[in-house]
Image (cartoon, grey):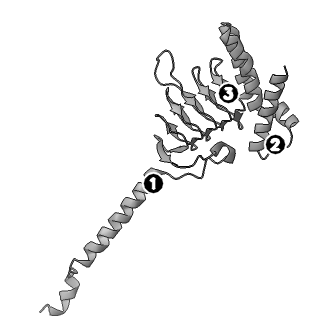
Amino acid sequence: MNRRVTRLGGLLAAYQRRDPAARSKLEIFLLYPGVHAILWHRLAHWLYRHDLRFLARCVSQWSRFWTGIEIHPGAVIGHRLVIDHGMGVVIGETTEIGDDCLLYQGVTLGGTGKDKGKRHPTLGDNVLVGCGAKILGPFRVGDNARIAGGAVVLREVPPNCTAVGVPAQIVRRAGEPVFYADDVDHTSVQNPTLERIAALAARVADLEKKLDMHTAPMHTVDEYDDYVI
């Protein structure tokens, strides 16, 4: 019992640390749907592991009705998961989420196709997933990774990296761990596709300038009007 109370206190502290609008742990406990969804999921997951699958689904659907957050009772969720706002979040059956992760509204941790077995993503520790992002498939998102808002991730994300765009591309941050979830920053990202397009546009402009410099000016008809007899 004491361990459960300690875990609940850690969860409330995680919300308080990452949500500047949170004024007290009591407010978080009573009014935050993300907290309610996690608590209902703990019960649903216990029922699921004890082969009470129908009751587990009843609990998860009850939680979905009240919170707007759909978590399959089979999903494995670590400690101190923060679901900010939460409306529209979907977490699939074989999803695994590590400790200290942060999900925003509209996130989907989904599968692809109708394959049996592992078909949903695995999130490492301290992963941030921005609003509206979709992570689809049975691959791993490494520790301290960041998924930008609106990204669609279809392949593995290494640790300490950012995934941006549709489909998502990886921006590597080698050398030092970056704790994105603690920074609560899912917008200050660079899009590598836009950077490449900008580089190509600059190159084309440079080539056009050089071409203009090496091309003789063309005479127009108006320049010869004075010589017409």
Instruction: Residue lying at the far left in this picture: please name it.
Output: 229
Relative image position of residue 212 (x, y in whole percent): 27, 75
Residue 85's place in the image compared with 36, above or below, is below
Front residue of 228/59: it is 59
Mark 1 lies on a secondary structure that is helix
Front residue of 173/60: it is 173
Mark 2 lies on a secondary structure that is loop
Q: Which residue is mark 3?
A: 78
Q: Which residue is mark 2?
A: 22
For the C terminus, give its image quadrant: bottom left
The residue drawn where x is 79% and y is 45% is: 21
Q: Say which label, 1 or 3, has the lower sequence index.
A: 3
| Residue 124 in view (yes/no) | yes
The residue drawn where x is 67% and y is 32% is: 99
Q: Quadrant of residue 25?
A: top right
Q: Which residue is mark 1?
A: 194
Instruction: Residue lying at the far front in this picture: please name it.
Output: 175
Residue 56's place in the image compared with 24, above or below, is above
Of badges 1 and 3, nearer the viewer stands 3
Q: CA distance from mark 2 to mark 3?
A: 22 Å
Q: Quadrant of residue 100?
A: top right
Mark 3 lies on a secondary structure that is loop
The residue drawn where x is 48% and y is 34% is: 156
